[in-house]
């Protein structure tokens, strides 16, 4: 199974993932895309080269998640679907019946406060991402980290898992034409 946490930067995805690993009964792995970015060497790149490297990083991340899940592992994915191709790539790679798509929401003022407190994100990143990240509009379950703690979000997800309906959000997204707002990184 792939528990797919999608939300803007600073929305609380990693905090929920950490709590999910603690509350879920089975062994699972947290695979945050930030870890893949952190593995990359740092070289001077032109804007165009950087765009290509970032795209390849995301594509490799998607394939690593698919590989872990195909090997029988439960994977908690921490992701930002801020470009339509990312969702299309995941839809093509992941068995849609095995994905639980979780919308991680947070009010913009709180996102901005978190960004400032973190200091490791460009100011306004979450504001630029918010419409694109949730533009596909379909989730299996949603949570709001502005009003709910990461632990309570994780508990809500755990409670939802045994009674998740079919078709899943991924199955519905695969069956429908994908229309999302213009892309932002």
Image: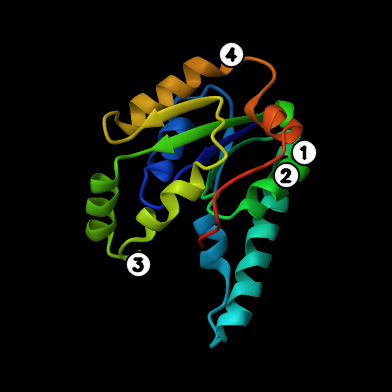
- Within 10 Å of disc 4 (Cα), the crowding (few <14, some 14-19, many 20+) is few
Q: Which residue is mark 1?
A: 70
Q: Which residue is mark 4?
A: 162
Q: Which residue is mark 2?
A: 66
x, y percentage for residue 72?
Answer: 74, 33
Give the alpha-carbon distance from disc 2 to disc 3, as whole Å: 30 Å
x, y percentage for residue 33?
Answer: 54, 54
Give the alpha-carbon distance from disc 3 to disc 4, as whole Å: 38 Å
Image position of 146 (left or right of 156): left
The part of the image, by quadrant, that contains residue 26 is top right
Dot 1 and dot 2 residues touching (CB under 8 Å):
yes
Of badges 2 and 3, the one in the foreground is 3
- Within 10 Å of disc 1 (Cα), the crowding (few <14, some 14-19, many 20+) is some
For label 3, the SS is: loop
Q: Earlier in the sequence, mark 2 or mark 4?
A: 2
x, y percentage for residue 115?
Answer: 29, 57
Image position of 35 (left or right of 171): left
């Amino acid at each position: 199974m792939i528990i797919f946490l999608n939300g803007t930067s600073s929305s609380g995805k990693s905090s929920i993932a950490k709590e999910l690993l603690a509350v879920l009964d089975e062994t699972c792995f947290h695979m945050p895309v930030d870890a893949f970015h952190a593995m990359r060497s740092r070289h001077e790149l032109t804007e165009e080269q950087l765009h290509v490297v970032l795209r390849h990083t995301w594509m490799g991340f998607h394939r690593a998640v698919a590989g872990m899940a195909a090997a029988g592992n439960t994977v908690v994915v921490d992701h930002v679907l801020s470009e339509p191709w990312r969702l299309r790539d995941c839809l093509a790679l992941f068995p849609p019946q095995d994905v639980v798509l979780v919308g991680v929401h947070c009010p913009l003022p709180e996102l901005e406060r978190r960004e400032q407190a973190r200091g490791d994100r460009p100011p306004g990143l979450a504001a630029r991402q918010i419409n694109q990240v949730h533009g596909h509009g379909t989730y299996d379950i949603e949570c709001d980290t502005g009003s709910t703690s990461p632990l309570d979000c994780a508990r809500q997800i755990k409670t939802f898992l045994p009674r998740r309906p079919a078709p899943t959000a991924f199955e519905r997204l695969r069956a429908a034409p994908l229309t999302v707002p213009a892309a932002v990184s």
